[in-house]
Amino acid sequence: MRLKPIRLLAGFALLLSAFTATAQTAVPLFNGTNLTGWKAVSFGGEGEVSIEKGELRLPAGAAMTGVAYTNKVPSDRYELVVEAKKIDGNDFFATITFPVGTNFCSLVTGGWGGAVVGLSSVDGQDASENETTKYIKFEREQWYTFKIQVTPENISAWVDTNQVIKLPLANRKISLRRGSIDLCKPLGLASYQTTSSIRKIELRPLPEKQ
């Protein structure tokens, strides 16, 4: 049976649409030159944020030092990639705050003395006490890639190539830990009494389910 040209064209258009939906391009959020699109967060006692050798430097403060993104970001169906390293200190060095639907959450990177990785907060419990808690040793002066994927169904996270979190969102309460981390909304990075550098921040839309 021969297909009519109009049916062939319709099939090709559907295939092209599906390909386009799955081939979204990552958008760099940090230009490596200045803080365009970002602002230093006034936590109180923070270190002075700077750009050094194309890297975003978060110096150790009395408590937290961080930055918040000033442009609009998606609330779901996106992937966020951050490359960061710890330079000095013994606590989290690149905790990432990000939107989840109408709420916000943080991926803690080396908190509570330097090893805890997890989401704060899930059902009111911090990264150190909920089901996403992992323990990872982070070496100084070593680059790590943190990847977060947010969909209406799940929050997923990787450290380098290792998936460390896949949290189903049905019937879960997602929120930020109480305190000044709220100043990192809608998207931000923070260190705690630790000096760190960030060299890549990229965001990529994720396709709708096919």
Image: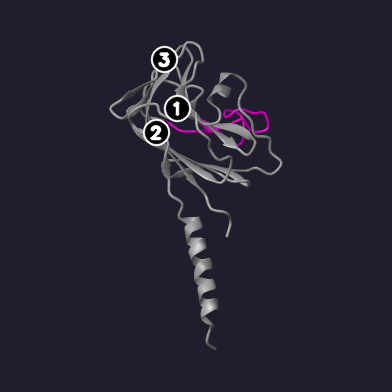
User: Disc 1 designates what residue?
Assistant: 38
Quadrant containing the C terminus in the rendered view? bottom right
Marked residue nearer the N-terminal end (1 or 2): 2
CA gap, disc 1 and disc 2 = 8 Å
Give the farthest residue toward the left. Answer: 53
| Residue 63 visible in the picture | yes
Seen from the viewer's position, the closer of residues 34 and 141 is 34
Image position, residue 160 (x, y; %):
41, 41
Mark 3 and mark 2: Cα distance apart in space: 19 Å
Three-letter residue code for mark 1: Trp
Q: Which label is found at residue 30?
A: 2
Q: Residue under circle 3?
A: 47
Can the viewer see residue 132 in this picture?
A: no
Quadrant of the snapshot with the N terminus: bottom right
Position of residue 198 measured from the top left corner of the image (x, y, whole percent): 38, 30
| Range drawn in magenta | 117-137
